[in-house]
Image (tube, rainbow, N blue to C red):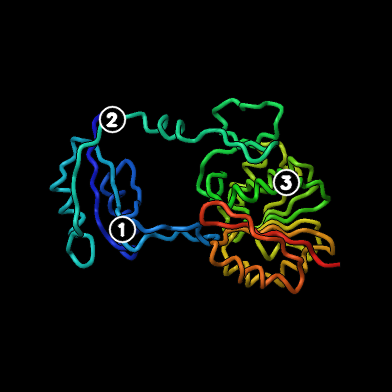
Amino acid sequence: MPWLQLTLETTPENAEELSELLGEAGASAVTFLDSANQPLYEPPVGETPLWSRTRVIGLFDAATDMDALLTQISNAITPNHLPDYRISPLEDKDWEREWMDSFKPMPFGHRLWVVPSWTLAPQPQAINILLDPGLAFGTGTHPTTALCLQWLDEHGADHNEVIDYGCGSGILAVAAAKLGAGHVWAVDNDPQALIATHDNAQKNNVAENIDAVLPDALPGLQTPLLLANILAQPLMDFAERFATHVMPGGHIVLSGILAGQAEQVAASYAPWFSMEPATFKDDWVRLNGQRRR
């Protein structure tokens, strides 16, 4: 079936309203795209930021009366003025198949692979994490997640307890469980992330090893390993709290940090940890350190 694509140029403040109006008008799908070539880095847990100039794109059946649709949207928005827009035909494709084809198995170090559920594992004897793209952040494609997976591949996680703070999809919690962790506390303040983590733990047969909890439900325990893939400012804010959760001699692994922020984040942890030099991937870094005895 042929399609018509309606693209509206707008601001973050108006994007959500336009998205809802397109849905009410019968759009088969609504997406957001950057309209100003502006990088959008990994969002804080529980947030979905938009670019300063955002394209809201609605996909409609080619038989849709677009003049009537535009009038309907114009009458519904406040003020009654349509932003710049364009309408373009779109060739018919198997969009689900195209999306699936774009997500391939990915290796991280020597042992770990992230494998979408619809493909065969390239190395069946490796430690394969079955994971599909979803609403919660974290499939291994972002450099921050890749840096943490590479650390886990190199060092393992054969501990009684591990904390994954800001778990997103649960990818790091699942990896830790598959690498030998007896129990993982997967922590996030986004309920969707906790659901995704639980689902991915079940998919990988490690649900009994992982508790997905809100931050207030994390007990006051000390662990040999704490992973936190969030952002620089919350990492600095949580430095003392994280230090209380890592036993003497234990390790902390931090990511979600831009290269220019590494020195400041490392300094926040220096009172409690012996921090190692940063590890870089693209514009992002990983910091890891050992709790002083």
Disc 2 marks a residue whose amino acid type is Asp
Q: Name the residue type under label 1.
A: Ala
* x, y percent for residue 20: 32, 54
Label 1 neighbourhood size at 10 Å, few (<14), some (14-19), many (20+)? Answer: few
Instruction: State the residue at coordinates (72%, 64%).
Output: 275
Q: Earlier in the sequence, mark 2 or mark 3?
A: 2
Question: Which residue bears the numbered disc 2?
Answer: 92
Quarter of the C terminus within the rendering: bottom right
Q: Amino acid at mark 3?
A: Ala
> Do we see residue 148 in this rendering?
yes
Q: Which residue is mark 3?
A: 176
Q: Earlier in the sequence, mark 3 or mark 1?
A: 1
- Dot 3: element: helix
Q: Residue furthest right?
A: 293
Q: Quadrant of the N terminus?
A: top left
Residue 213 visible in image? no
Q: Secondary structure at mark 1?
A: loop
Q: Earlier in the sequence, mark 2 or mark 1?
A: 1
Badge 2 crowding class, 10 Å Cα cut-off, few under 14, some 14 to 19, many 20 or more, is few
| Disc ID at residue 36 | 1
Residue 71 on image: x %, y % = 15, 54
Question: Left or right of 185: which side holds 199?
Answer: left
Dot 3 and dot 1 residues touching (CB under 8 Å): no
CB within 8 Å, label 2 to label 1? no
Residues 148 and 77: in front is 148
Query: The residue tagged with tag 2: helix, strand or loop?
Result: loop
**Where is residue 288, by image quadrant?**
bottom right
